[in-house]
Image (cartoon, rainbow, N blue to C red):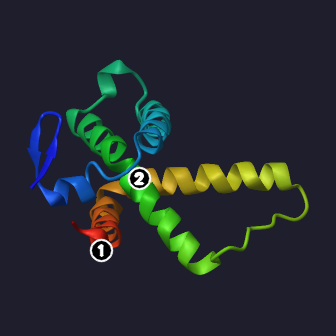
Amino acid sequence: MVWRKGGAVSLFEVNTVLGLPPRFVATHWFFGVMIAVLSVNLVTEGPEDIDAALILLATMNTLVYPYARFLYSWVAMFFLNDRKMVFHGRWILLRFVYVFAVAVMLWSLSVLLAPIGMLVRYTTKGSSRS
């Protein structure tokens, strides 16, 4: 058990749920909300078409999107190491398409990818247990 301001918190919670930096989580929640609003607007034709299951799925995807994004960053750094990705040609358009495609794919699969991201976060941060 680890003591925080509000009381005791388990080591699992510190290494997974509370382990990501607050700025990282806030940034990706912001982008997750934008993607959720865009996807709900694209899927529905009006306010009467909005289904409760769609809202629930969009909310769950948005809440766990930072952990899916963490997994993507971890895998990308594993394969790229310290190298940078280089876009040739119309790099502004390619960069925009790449970022948007990755964000939408990660957001739509975040319910499936986030538990893996939490496991990776737990194992990588959990190696320095006190």
- Of the 4 image quadrants, the one containing the N terminus is bottom left
Which one is in front, 23 or 87? 23
Picture residue at 46% right of the left edge, 42% below the top: 28
Which mark is drawn over residue 127?
A: 1
At which x and y percent is residue 13? Answer: 19, 54
Which one is in front, 51 or 61? 61
Q: Is residue 37 left or right of residue 64?
A: right
Task: Report the label total.
Answer: 2
Q: Residue furthest bottom?
A: 79
Q: Residue furthest right?
A: 89
Picture residue at 33% right of the left edge, 66% below the top: 125
At which x and y percent is residue 101? Answer: 60, 54
At which x and y percent is residue 45? Answer: 43, 27
Picture quadrant where residue 114 is located: bottom left
- Of the 4 image quadrants, the one containing the C terminus is bottom left
Q: In the structure shown, which secondary structural element does the residue marked by tag 1 occupy?
A: helix
Which mark is drawn over residue 108?
A: 2
